[in-house]
């Protein structure tokens, strides 16, 4: 059987395949085809009977898609290990711990409950590259004959392995170590998602009097008014109860954001600032910190003052990981709270990141309540400019416009212009110490783009 090299890649997005569950690209039929195609991809690359870990978040549609995905995998001869509800990084942990050939996660992360998605991991627990996903997609159109389909003992099998989720929680607890006492109190928001089945027992095991909320999933309330998508929930709780810190996850717990004791959110840039200094002090940072083009210039200023370099990459955690590997860095992430500490994990792990942030603050003697003030981010303005599909703005125009306008900022700011990946929009970001100048430059860029598209 051969793949179809003519097929145009369009199914996979920046984080797997995602859509409203039971519609469009996220039907049971599509899940079955995806599962089968992933196994065909592995089989034709020398893995005769792939062993695959499958986990999901708490969405009602998760079990439906899990059944279909597993059917597709076993129909192609795979041995599938069903982990049940588990954070995305927990699937990565299971793949590495057991030496499986890959993994699959059924989750739509921060999206509302009606959405769901499927993303694949390789045998090291890393998310697949664009090229690998394109190769998998090439198998989607194949019409398999009965002569090819496995039968008898060659048909794949399912194994229920919920104990791996427990082992993942135990491993997280072990990361704290014994050199520092665990903080006595705080709050944790599980977003009614996958962290609901790991975080409560973890924080109880570590000790203290931690308040856990957002841990009552009903299949329909994931991310609803809780978690990183509604930081006012944890921030308000921390302020109301007089707690020193709050931790919030997203639906699949690969992202984390925090609240200080005054009820103010702490984003990924602040976490990278603290974690970068801490890892550097222990000689574990590598060549520097990886941040996306959206991270604030204040991050470069603060880390630069410590002699630490910031490597920029495009938006997306997979590109953070690629840049980590390319530069020899061991810490990277996004403002959104998707942080990767590559000496410990192979993908974003919100629970791990939150624990390490607390540990870093204690080790460095940082006062969490002063971080937001001391970080002092550059003012930013992000505007969306509608463009017609007939009059696209090409890369040469964007480069020329940026190079003409950026000198106006005098080195105390930056410009980022990029097309939306899903809508006929140009996204225009301007960042500058001088807020008035920032607004003036933003107007200049928006007007120039509109004139070009007139």
Image (spheres, helix red, strand yellow):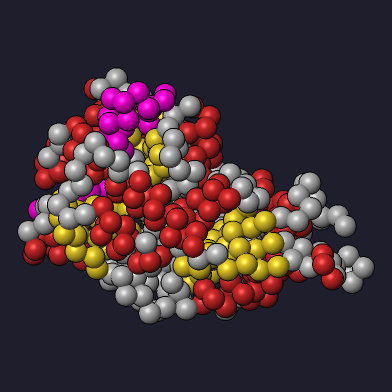
**Residue 252: % across, % down:** 42, 61
- Quarter of the view holding residue 445: top left
Q: Is residue 32 magenta?
A: no
Left or right: 242 with respect to 433? Answer: left
Position of 398 relative to 106 (above/below): above
Q: Nearer the viewer, residue 59 or 282?
A: 282
The quarter of the picture where the N terminus appears is bottom right
* Relative image position of residue 437 (x, y in whole percent): 22, 38
Rendered image quadrant of residue 234? bottom left
- Judging depth in this view, the residue of 279 and 269 nearest the camera is 279
Residue for point 19% across, 43% down: 181
- In front here: 76 or 30? 76
- Residue 278 part of the magenta segment: yes
Residue most toward the top? 307
Residue 421: give x, y in percent of width and height: 51, 54
Residue at 42 percent across and 78 percent down: it is: 219
Q: Vertically, is 339 above or below 323?
A: below
Instruction: Using the rendered image of the protein, determine whether residue 253 is visible from the camera's viewpoint.
Output: yes
């Amino acid at each position: 059987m051969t793949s179809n090299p003519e097929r145009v890649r369009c199914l996979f997005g920046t984080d797997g395949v995602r859509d409203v569950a039971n519609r469009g690209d996220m039907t049971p039929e599509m899940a079955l085809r995806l599962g089968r195609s992933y196994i065909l991809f592995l089989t034709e690359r020398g893995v005769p009977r792939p062993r695959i870990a499958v986990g999901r978040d708490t969405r009602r549609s998760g079990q439906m898609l899990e059944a279909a995905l597993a059917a597709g995998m076993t129909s192609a001869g795979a041995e599938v290990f069903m982990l049940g509800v588990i954070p995305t990084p927990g699937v990565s942990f299971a793949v590495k711990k057991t030496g499986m050939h890959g993994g699959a996660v059924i989750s739509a992360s921060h999206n509302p409950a009606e959405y769901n998605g499927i993303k694949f991991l390789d045998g090291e627990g890393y998310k697949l590259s664009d090229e690998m996903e394109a190769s998998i997609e090439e198998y989607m159109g194949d019409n398999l004959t009965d002569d090819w389909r496995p039968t008898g003992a060659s048909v794949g099998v399912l194994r229920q392995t919920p104990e791996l989720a427990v082992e993942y929680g135990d491993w997280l607890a072990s990361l704290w170590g014994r050199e520092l006492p665990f903080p006595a109190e705080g709050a944790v928001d599980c977003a009614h998602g996958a962290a609901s089945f790991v975080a409560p027992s973890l924080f109880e095991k570590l000790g203290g009097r931690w308040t856990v909320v957002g841990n009552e999933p009903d299949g329909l309330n994931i991310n609803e008014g809780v978690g990183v998508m509604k930081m006012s929930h944890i921030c308000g709780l921390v302020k109301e109860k007089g707690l020193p810190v709050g931790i919030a996850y997203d639906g699949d717990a690969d992202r984390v954001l925090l609240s200080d004791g005054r009820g103010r959110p702490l984003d990924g840039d602040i976490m990278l600032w603290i974690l970068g200094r801490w890892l550097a002090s222990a000689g574990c940072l590598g060549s520097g910190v990886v941040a996306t083009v959206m991270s604030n210039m204040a991050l470069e200023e603060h880390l630069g003052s410590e002699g630490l370099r910031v490597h920029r990459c495009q938006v997306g955690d997979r590109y953070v990981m690629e840049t980590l590997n390319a530069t020899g860095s061991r810490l990277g992430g996004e403002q959104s709270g998707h942080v990767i500490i590559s000496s410990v994990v192979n993908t974003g792990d919100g629970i791990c990141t939150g624990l390490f942030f607390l540990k870093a603050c204690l080790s460095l003697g940082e006062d969490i309540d002063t971080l937001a003030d001391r970080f002092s981010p550059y003012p930013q303005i992000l505007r969306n400019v509608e463009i017609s599909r007939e009059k696209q703005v090409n890369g040469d125009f964007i480069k020329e416009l940026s190079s003409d306008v950026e000198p106006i900022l005098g080195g105390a700011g930056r410009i980022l212009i990029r097309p939306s990946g899903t809508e006929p929009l140009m996204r225009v970001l301007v960042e500058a110490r001088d807020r008035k100048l920032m607004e003036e430059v933003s107007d200049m860029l928006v007007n120039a783009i509109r004139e070009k598209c007139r």
